[in-house]
Image (cartoon, rainbow, N blue to C red):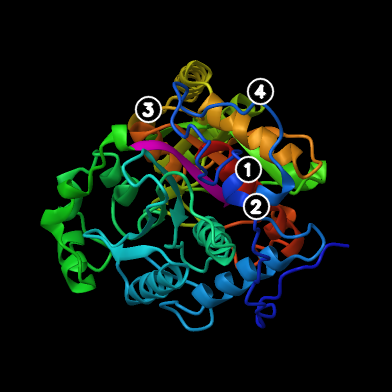
Amino acid sequence: MREQSVSKEGPESTGASFETQTDVCSSGWGFWMSPTVNAFGPSRFPLRSGPVPETLRPMTNATDLILGRRVMTMIEDLAQHTDEPGRLTRLYLSKAHRKAAEATLRLMQEAGLDAHIDALGSVVGRIDGSHPDAPALLIGSHIDSVVDAGRYDGNLGVVLGIVVVEALRQQGLAPACPIEIVAFGDEENVRFPTNLSTSQALAGRFNPAWLDGRDQDGIALRDALIAFGGDPEGAAGLARDPARYRGYLEVHIEQGPLLEAKDLPVGIVSAINGITRARCSVTGEAGHAGTVPMSMRRDALAAVAEMIGIVERAGSTRTDTVATVGVAQVQPGAINVIPARVDFTLDARSPDDAVREAMVQDIVTECQAAAQRRGVDFTIEPFMESPATPMDKELIARLEGAVRSLGTEPFHLSSGAGHDAVAMAILCPSAMLFVRCKGGISHNPAESITVEDADAAARVLIEAVNRIAV
């Protein structure tokens, strides 16, 4: 049985210690700089001519769980920062976000990173390594949350990046290239009408119109950013030069049940699903529920019920596709009145854009036919088209090797949810590692991972860095 994380009392802090290696700088192998290493060959991620000596791997014994316990301690520390007592809610630019950002800043600084909170509220830490001018490796995720959230979504990837740097410092080792750890602030996009705004900024895709978006209390993002201590005018200056970055790695809980079903601690993301979102409306005719014969009704809700079945079938009959009606609003909403209008949403996803587009077209065609048959009007207004994001094949290969180093065969899966890696893939090659979560539950206080799986993820990430940042 794997050791489960505890929701109220965090696992014991270990103050992880690592045994210093004495032969690192003379071996001529691997990630850590030595006089005989050609750190920047013609390949983006040069291949080694043989296995990496065990002495070069800043990894704990697979059974001591030191890294996993350290990850859990840091997760519990960040979970204290919430805007709602009794549950974890940490929206972008809220007071809790500021406190969590400051706590993350301290963790980075204690790990030896040169860290700061940037103009949009992301926390960025950097260690230069032996070649400060070499293209850097980015590792990151986010520290904002949904309302009544779990504690691992996003936070896990941030603390794992810090744990990697801690491991280097504990062993007195310097990476061959710079490493940057980033804790993004606006991945969930719950508070403001944005789309991965903080990671899009690093990719040079920040939309200035986002600054005028307002939350449900009427507060503009621009004003919230100033209150947070940020700088609305500094967003454009956050854009990174793609030539200065060799890759981005993000570790994240799976948010699904596949890894648990396969009894695997980690999985490698092949692609992040493309998404189509649309607002749909069906208009019929209101009437008395007791006097209008069934054959003469133009019932908008009955039509939508059929359309929901169409959406469900469309998502179920293809490989790696999902389709969902998540919201339906009925008017006039009276128990004795035939519904006159229903507004509903469509969310369709696939790792293959052509498949997704064909699925959406089939849904529209069938819904139009159902509307005509029932004598109602159907309209659809797409408002989001996010293309699928394939992960970088070379980085995937490095993750595969890292997973095999644990004695586990790599398992590939697509991500149904969006992540900061979507934006970062615009900037540089990107890859993701998923970590098993109990029951596939996420965006929920019941979100849970084990200490063993946290430890495995940490060891995979360290080994992946060893294979990438040469």
Task: Name the outermost residue toward the right.
Answer: 1
Q: Look at 32% across and 31% down and name the residue there.
A: 381
Q: Which mark is residue 377?
A: 3
Magenta highlight range: 245-253
Local crowd at mark 4 within 10 Å, few (<14), some, or many (≥20)?
few
Tell me how far mark 2 sits from mark 4, CA to CA.
Answer: 50 Å
Upstream in the sequence, badge 4 or badge 3?
4
Task: Identify the element where label 4 is drawn.
Answer: loop
Secondary structure of the residue carrying tag 2 is loop
Q: Which mark is residue 319?
A: 4
Position of residue 251 measured from the top left corner of the image (x, y, whole percent): 56, 49
Q: Earlier in the sequence, mark 2 or mark 4?
A: 2
**Residue at 56% over, 30% down:** 311
Pointer 3 local density, CA inside 10 Å: few below 14, some 14–19, many at least 20 = some
Q: Which residue is mark 2?
A: 23
Determine whether label 1 and label 2 are within 8 Å by CB: yes
- The residue that mark 1 highlights is 27
The answer, for residue 287, to whether it is visible in the render is no
Q: Name which of mark 2 and mark 3 comes first in the sequence.
A: 2
Q: Are marks 2 and 3 in contact (CB under 8 Å)?
A: no
Q: Quadrant of the N terminus?
A: bottom right
**Would residue 147 appear left or right of 164 to someone viewing this image?**
left
What is the distance, in whole Å, between disc 2 and disc 3 at their CAs?
75 Å
User: N-terminal of the two: label 1 or label 4?
Assistant: 1
Q: Left or right: where does residue 280 sit relative to residue 411?
A: left
Report the Cα–Cα distance between label 1 and label 2: 6 Å
Q: Where is residue 151 shown, x and y percent of the image?
A: 56, 67
* Three-letter residue code for mark 3: Asp
For numbered disc 1, what is the local secondary structure? Answer: loop
Asked if residue 247 lies in the magenta stretch, the reply is: yes
